[in-house]
Image: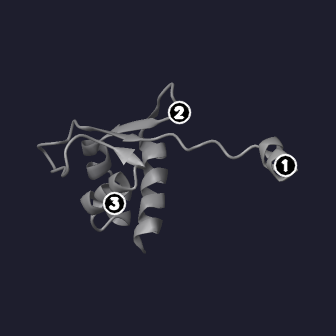
Amino acid sequence: MNVEEEIQKLEEEIHRLGSLQPDGSYKVTFGVLFNDDRCANIFEALVGTLRAAKKRKIVAFPGELLLQGVHDKVEITLRPSPPPPQASSVSAATS
């Protein structure tokens, strides 16, 4: 699995384990992700996947590195997906 596939799987797992926020984002704590059996089977290096997703501005969390135990209560935020482009604005731009 390449990095992009792992980040996509991470998004799916945050949707599954996290809670939807009013702004459309999802929040989950690092401990919930790290200790989930399904995540343990999917991600060989969860921390590395989280760092790659943070670098791409897909998730947000404080600090650079999360460690089991020490950072179990740290919230990870999956940013809301941008809305798809509207057909009317696309067709207006081509007219």
Instruction: Measuring from the top left, give residue 80's x and y in whole percent.
Output: 51, 40
Query: From what the image shows, is residue 72 above or below residue 44?
Result: above
Q: Is mark 2 on a helix, strand or loop?
A: loop
Question: From the viewer's perspective, is residue 45 above or below residue 83?
Answer: below
Q: How far apart are marks 1 and 2 (CA)?
A: 27 Å
Q: Is residue 70 left or right of residue 13?
A: left
Say which label, 1 or 2, has the lower sequence index.
Answer: 2
User: Local crowd at mark 1 within 10 Å, few (<14), some, or many (≥20)?
Assistant: few
Quarter of the picture holding the N terminus: bottom left
CB contact under 8 Å: marks 2 and 3: no
| 44 sits to left or right of 42 | left
Hey, which quadrant is residue 39 in on the image?
A: bottom left
Determine the residue located farthest toward the right in the rendered image.
Answer: 95
Viewer-proximal residue, 58 or 85? 85
* x 70%, y 46%: residue: 85
Which residue is rendered at x = 51% and y = 28% of the image? 23
Question: Considering only vertical position in the picture, is 4 above or below 56?
Answer: below
Q: Which amino acid does label 3 sit on?
A: Ala
Q: Nearer the viewer, residue 55 or 94?
A: 94
Query: Quick one: label 2 or label 3, which is nearer the N terminus?
Result: 2
- Which residue is rendered at x = 43% and y = 46% of the image? 14
On the image, numbered disc 2 is attached to which residue? 24
What label sits on residue 37 in the rendered view?
none
Circle 3 is placed at which residue position?
52
Who comes first in sequence, dot 3 or dot 1? 3
Amino acid type, mark 2:
Gly
Q: How many marks?
A: 3
Instruction: Confirm or deny contact between disc 3 and disc 1 (CB under 8 A).
Output: no
10 Å crowding of disc 2: few (<14), some (14-19), many (20+)? few
Figure coloring: one colour
Residue designated by label 1: 91
Question: Nearer the observer, disc 1 or disc 2?
Answer: 1
